[in-house]
Image (cartoon, rainbow, N blue to C red):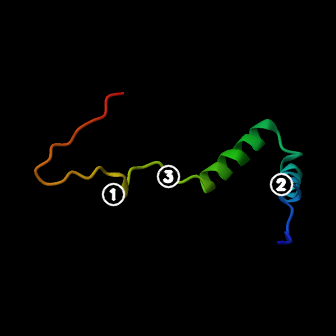
Amino acid sequence: MKTKTFDCVEMMHKGAKRIHETTRNMSRKAELAYWQARAKELLPTTQPTAHHAAVVREGQTPYRVAR
């Protein structure tokens, strides 16, 4: 039987406490700026890249899926 060396709930609580300590004295505007900056750091860019482009083989016509 494996023995866990960490506790997921404890880890979640530590992260929440760290964020609370960081943001507890911030105004709403400052907290919003904090979260926007964090999201910008963590989320990938949404600009299309080469690997998102559709691949069309020679002799085939491109098509679109109706939505």
What residue is disc 1 on? Answer: 50
| Among numbered discs 3 and 2, the one appearing first in the sequence | 2
Q: Is residue 30 above or below residue 52?
A: above
Of residues 35 and 51, the one nearer the viewer is 51
Residue 14 placement: quadrant: bottom right
The answer to the question of whether label 3 and label 2 lie on touching residues, with beta carbons closer than 8 A, is: no
Q: Residue furthest top?
A: 67
The answer to the question of whether label 1 and label 3 lie on touching residues, with beta carbons closer than 8 A, is: no
What residue is disc 3 on? Answer: 45
Under tag 3, what secondary structure?
loop
Residue drawn at (31%, 28%) of the image: 66
Per the model, the C-alpha gap separating discs 3 and 2 is 26 Å
Q: Quadrant of the C terminus?
A: top left
Of residues 15 and 41, the one nearer the viewer is 15
Q: Amino acid at mark 3?
A: Thr
Relative image position of residue 30 (x, y in whole percent): 76, 43
Relative image position of residue 26 (x, y in whole percent): 84, 44
The answer to the question of whether label 2 and label 1 lie on touching residues, with beta carbons closer than 8 A, is: no
Under tag 2, what secondary structure?
helix
In the picture, measured across the screen, residue 37 lies left or right of residue 45, that is right
Q: Is residue 30 above or below residue 17?
A: above
Q: Residue furthest left?
A: 59
What residue is disc 2 on? Answer: 12
Which label sits in the foreground, 2 or 1?
A: 2
Of residues 60 and 2, the one nearer the viewer is 2
Q: Quadrant of the N terminus?
A: bottom right
Residue drawn at (85%, 67%) of the image: 6
